[in-house]
Amino acid sequence: MARASKRLLDIYERMASHYGPTHWWPGDTPFEIAIGAILTQNTAWTNVEKAIANLKRGNLMNPRAILEADDALLHEVLRPSGYFRIKTLRVRSFCRHLVDRYGGSMARMAKRPLDELRPELLDIPGIGPETADDILLYACEKPVFVVDAYTRRMLSRHGLVEPKIGYEDLRAFFERQLPNEVHLFKEYHGLVVWTGKDFCRRKPNCAGCPLAPILKRGQPRPD
DNA sequence: GGCCAGGACACCA
DNA sequence: TGGTGTCATGGC
């Protein structure tokens, strides 16, 4: 087995034995997962939860209801998640596509092959690489590895990749080195998020981090 | 009271 | 192609 592949699986095992199953992503339905993926762009999940609760309370957690709601209502509902004007546009553009192309059905969308669906999602305004891959992996069960800020930080700290590696290169790195399994990709990303939140955010050291024992000697902790 | 969060996009050199 | 500004709320 290649060295990088072994290292990635070692990192996974350490996080998994520390936390157990994460059952990531939080969300009751594929549609809710997709909306959460858009709302969490550059935003703390605690703020996203409030907006999602607002959507449910207002019976707006379905694509047609969102398309029919007026801007003022969506602004109020999405306000807690920040960037509420731009997120109103982005949530709508996703719903517009879902309704026009798949009759509003996430299940129907998920039947499309990955190599056709990914470029299609990336073509929707407001859906970038990470958001598209969140939707593909967690809402559509496609074997895509999700890269985020925590992933880049973690791997560059461990000396596995350059800190400025691009999104697609880092995604390809994971997908090349790991077995192509949806369950593994889901859990790996969930564990990265949990580890990142617990140990990599606003903390001067990594005390208690399940990955601390394998940090390269002399590797700077904060970036 | 300041800093920052699981990004995406427009604009500019 | 790479760097920078913008979008906004809420927790720490």
Image: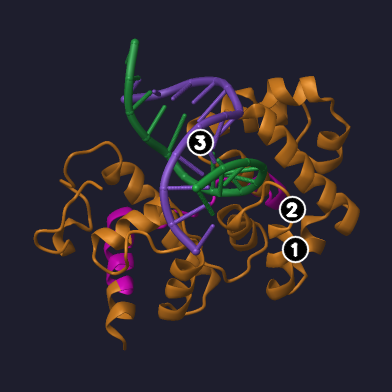
Chain colours: A orange, B green, C purple
Res. A52 visible in picture: yes
In magenta stretch: residue A113 = no
Give coordinates of residue A172: x percent, y percent.
48, 74
Three-letter amino acid code at disc 3? Thr
Left or right: where does residue A34 sit relative to residue A102? left
Q: Secondary structure at mark 1?
A: helix
Give coordinates of residue A151: x percent, y percent.
39, 57
The reply to whether dot 1 and dot 3 touch (C-beta < 8 Å) is: no
Give coordinates of residue A65: x percent, y percent.
85, 35
Q: CA distance from mark 2 to mark 3?
A: 20 Å
Q: Chain of mark 3?
A: A
Front-most of residues A73 and A170: A170
Res. A20 visible in picture: no
Which is more foreground, mark 2 or mark 3? 2
**Residue that appears at 80% across and 45% down:** A95
Label placed on residue A120? 1
**Residue that appears at 35% across and 43% down:** A197
In magenta stretch: residue A31 = yes
Q: Which residue is mark 3?
A: A43
**Residue sitting at the far left:** A218
Q: What secondary structure do most residues of the magenta stretch adopt?
A: helix
Q: Secondary structure at mark 2?
A: loop
**Residue that appears at 18% across and 47% down:** A206
Give coordinates of residue A210: x percent, y percent.
22, 56
The mark that comes first in sequence, 1 or 3, is: 3
Q: Chain of mark 1?
A: A
The reply to whether dot 1 and dot 2 touch (C-beta < 8 Å) is: yes
Question: Badge 3: few (under 14), some or many (20 or more) residues near its Cα, within 10 Å?
Answer: few
Query: Which span of residues is magenta-colored?
Result: A8-33
Three-letter amino acid code at disc 2? Ile
